Image: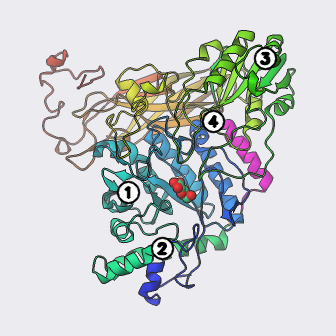
Amino acid sequence: MKYDLKNFTIDEKIKLLSGKTYWTTGDADGKVRELWLCDGPHGLRKRVNDATVPATAMPCLVNLANSWDRESVRLSAQTIADDCIENDVDVLLAPGVNIKRTPLCGRNYEYFSEDPFLAGELAIQFINGAQDSGVGTSLKHYCMNNRDFERLFQSNEADERTMREIYLKPFEMAVKNSKPTTVMCAYNLVNGILASENKWILTDILRDDWGFEGLVVSDWSAVKNAYKSLIAGVDLEMPSNQPSYQVLKDALDKGLITEELIDLHAQRVLDLIEKCDKNKESRKAKFTPSQRHENAVKVAGEGIVLLKNDGILPIKSGEIMVTGMEVNKPAIGAFGSAMVTSSYKLKNLCDVLNEQGVQANFKEYIIHREERSSIFAGGAYDSAFETDAVIICVKGPDEGEGGDRVRIKLHDYQEDFILNMAKANPNVVVCVYAGCAIDMSAWIDKVKGVIFVGLAGEGVHEALAPIIAGNLCPSGKLSETFPLCVEDTPSGTKLGNGYVDFYEEGLFVGYRYYDRFSKPVLFPFGFGLSYANFTYSNLKVEKQSETDYIVSYDITNNSDIDAKEISQIYVRDVLARVVRPYKELKGFSKDLIKAGETKRVSVKLDKSAFAFYSIPLKDWHVESGNFEIMVGASSQDIRLSAKIKIQMPDHTQSSFHYVAYPDYNLTKFGWKKGEVPDEPYKPFE
Ligand code: GLC
């Protein structure tokens, strides 16, 4: 139904600008339908009468990201959309695309990656998956909500280039490529101004630069002053907030805002209602409830990451002891608004392992509290001593909304238990259930296998067991660096002081940081093992235009099992007149390659693969010069590379650019006069 603002009084228009209830939008005194806005990224969380409606608990975004699989991300969103459709929900408050700046952030399990390109690409798929099913989305939390410590008060500060190239980039990619129904503004301040009152991000960048035409909704209670938020660009304050009506009325009477401004925002609310009404007429669920569970299992299987395998996996025979608190009650998500109440009875890992049809006898050993770190109490040691191998299932440190992690190591008793079991049995496999990087350095050398399970939803064990038993080849890779210790991360153990968190590492977040400072890590960004092994060959870089290329290469599966491989494209600007990360992810592909098969993979690169954000030019800028295209199995396992030379029109280039002065005295950097250097150039070395 089309709504015309002329049919609404000023009072009714003001009432459209904030919710009617905690989860529904205003109805302008009954003139329009209330819309339901519900969480979340891992499944529907619809609260009715203080209870949460049961829904399919899909893998968390950490697992979607570790899948690097566009199709899995779409499927997850489509599956969640079905629960929304069956529960009359109009907008799903997801996905979260905040950058994983620190592994201490409690909500990292709800975000995709440390890399903006990976986060942006997967957000596009999530949004398309939900919206193509007729359910709106909310791209969040805009912006720089990179930890939950003092999230309501702290100002997160970074220079504009860092913001544009890192923290805003996933939002820009999603807005430009998938047109999310809504964007949710964050709680925190951005460079000193509340995100909900920050016209620079909400209007100048989001709308004027990126062309966003949807609706800006506040995070819940993120609006501190209704008319200041309206002026900045918030269209809809959630949840309902009675005082806001009078604040807006008074501001209108004082001339602080105009009726035209109220109309602008009220129209966007009406547009959203019209869009949701239209969706409602035609949308219907794609999957049955049991198919949704199958989807949960399928998606979980794509995002589990094999981190270490000294030949112990897959386990196909022997007497195997399975132990740990997660065996029977696995962590499938974490605390906060992204929680899902699943009615599915989670499977015991041991039971599913025994169903896998392998010769092994998997026997669950219930750990009692006092046994956790004593190798002699209660027989844990004896049992481990007598079996052929031990599988230990451990949960990472507490994480979730409203509370950042206080550590990235497992708890002492967990580490002790692993070390004691490793003393009792040389064949230990550790399965880690966590939403973010874990410092495993205390015990990883003592065990033979490590699987990063993530927080993989209700189907977790129906995905994990086939991997352990060898019936499913692991194909996930890390979407964030696992550091050797939290002190090695760009922001270390610093939280900010409750007022300001200054992103002093600038562009150098995640692998960009470890590259720049040549810091060793436990597992690099993009790392994950397979039961198969792959070789890469025949790289070809075909020029389509000065900034458009097709990168193609062969991947051969040298094993006797079908398997999937995630190949990654990194681009290096060999010599720039600004500081740049050594290399940046600009493409990736996940491909099923059958046993013994060679598959040709191709990835397109466009201008965004080469450009950086120029502050003086206020735009993305490609400098003429040499670039290196790298194809990697991980960010630290580059298999192929090729150099290209980009020659942009001279009028687009700043005068004092090294190509303009090929004889500029490069010798001072030790390079031969007249030759453009081929080695990595670190101007601030
Ligand atoms: C929460 C979260 C946001 C969620 C919203 C509604 O505080 O920050 O992610 O969608 O409120 O629950």
Q: Is residue 12 above or below residue 273?
A: below
Q: Where 323 falls versus 206 (above or below)? A: above
Q: Nearer the viewer, mark 3 or mark 2?
A: 3
Q: Amino acid at mark 1?
A: Ala
Residue 377 has which mark? 3
Q: CA distance from mark 2 to mark 4?
A: 37 Å
Along the viewing direction, whichever of 556 and 542 lies nearer the viewer:
556
Residue 454 circle label = 4
Q: Quadrant of ligand 1?
A: bottom right
Q: Comparing marks 3 and 1, which lies closer to the viewer?
A: 3
Image coordinates of residue 196 in percent, x first then y, are 39, 61
Q: Three-letter amino acid code at disc 2?
A: Val
What separation in Å lies between label 3 and label 1 (alpha carbons)?
A: 54 Å
State the extent of the magenta-drawn residues as a range: 285-304
Of the image marks 2 and 4, the number of the one nearer the N terminus = 2
Residue at 45 percent across and 81 percent down: it is 13
Sequence-wise, the earlier of marks 3 and 4 is 3
Residue topped by disc 2: 269
Q: Rounded to the nearest whole Å, what is the CA distance between mark 1 and mark 4?
A: 30 Å
Q: Badge 2: few (under 14), some or many (20 or more) residues near its Cα, within 10 Å?
A: many
Kind of residue at badge 3: Ala
Count neighbours of disc 4 (C-alpha within 10 A) and say few if under 14, some if 14 to 19, many if 20 or more: many
Alpha carbons under labels 1 and 2: distance apart:
20 Å
